[in-house]
Amino acid sequence: MKIIFFGTPQFASRTLAYLVDHGIDIVAVVTKPDKPVGRSGKPVPCSVKVIAQEKLPEVPLFQPDKASTPEFIKTLAPFNADVFVVVAYGEIINQELLDLPKKACINVHASLLPKYRGAAPIQRAIMEGEKETGVTIMHMVKKLDAGPMIKQVKVKIGTNTTSAEMHDLLQKAGAEALLQVLKEIEEGIDIAVIQDETEVTYAKKIELEDCEIDWSQPARDIHNLIRGVTPHPGAWCWVLVRGAKKRLKILSSRFVMGYTETPGNILEFGKEGIIVACGEESLRLLEVKLEGKRAMSAEEFACGLSGSDLKFL
């Protein structure tokens, strides 16, 4: 069964590697163009391109600016693919391209659809305090993340699990489920369930303003925000350090019960780190990064400062 793989970031590249390692016949790979990075502006290949060149050096690799064009569809047509596999490709595919493969066009989405359709399902699930998420393998339709669901795998979210950790767990679960689905499609088994539109929620892209900490919120909600946007873009707040206003990223925290104080007040400061009062309960900061500085433990950050030197805004 001939597969064309569409994908761009690490979530997709690890899935591609898994399929190749398990003998799936990838006849072409489609990914996004190299992007300029850093001050030099030097183009850097995406993760899928790197893996494709490493594991599939003889397989055609395409990097169109846009895949859903008549010209590119004509380019893919001669491959006579049975299935398109799309994993975090980064573009909504039009109907003409969806109709090209003989058997199916399937997608791996990192949520239990119909919940968390959209760009940031892992982050949003954690930010909302979900105890469980998962991956969905679905048939693709023109509408975003709305196709019939072939398979779902549930994955628990730990109390302190970050989006980076969840990313790896879901990628592994998704790759394993995808392999099973491809084998079933090859055998002629294709049972899918229509999504319940009354249960739909959306996971919009994370913006910088979404990541600002409001200390008047409950500590548990702030903790969920921190782990949901770690490592990128990172939860942050404004602080005064010896009178200078700076941005402080909170990279790791723990929920602490039993404190009641004015939100933003420092309750503990020293060798045990920093505890900050919230709207409900409080939060122990474990790892932070002050703008212009490296990431460090809260204990190290507190070293050399007194409680009066630092104020959370």
Image: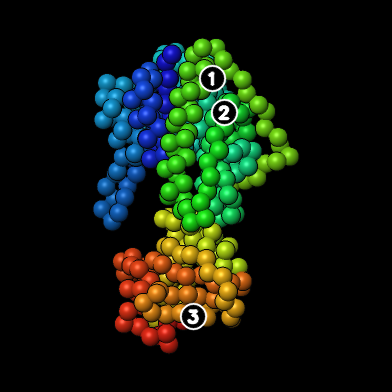
Judge depth for marks 2 and 1 and give the one in front: 2
Secondary structure under the numbered disc 1 in the rendered image: strand
| Rendered residue at 44%/38% (across/down) | 171
* Left or right for 8, reference 69: left
| Rendered residue at 48%/65% (across/down) | 254
Vertical position of residue 45 compared to residue 237: above or below:
above
The residue under label 2 is 151
The residue under label 1 is 104
* Left or right for 154, reference 21: right
Locate residue 44, reporting x and y percent.
Answer: 29, 43
Q: Earlier in the sequence, mark 2 or mark 3?
A: 2
Q: How many marks?
A: 3
Q: Mark 2 and 1 residues: CB-CB less than 8 Å, in contact?
A: no
Foreground: 30 or 253? Answer: 253
Foreground: 82 or 23? Answer: 23
| Rendered residue at 67%/28% (across/down) | 194
Q: CA distance from mark 3 to mark 1?
A: 56 Å
User: Is residue 195 at least partly visible in the picture?
Assistant: yes
Secondary structure under the numbered disc 3 in the rendered image: strand
Mark linked to residue 266 = 3
Vertical position of residue 97 compared to residue 253: above or below:
above
Q: Amino acid at mark 1?
A: Ala
Q: Amino acid at mark 2?
A: Lys
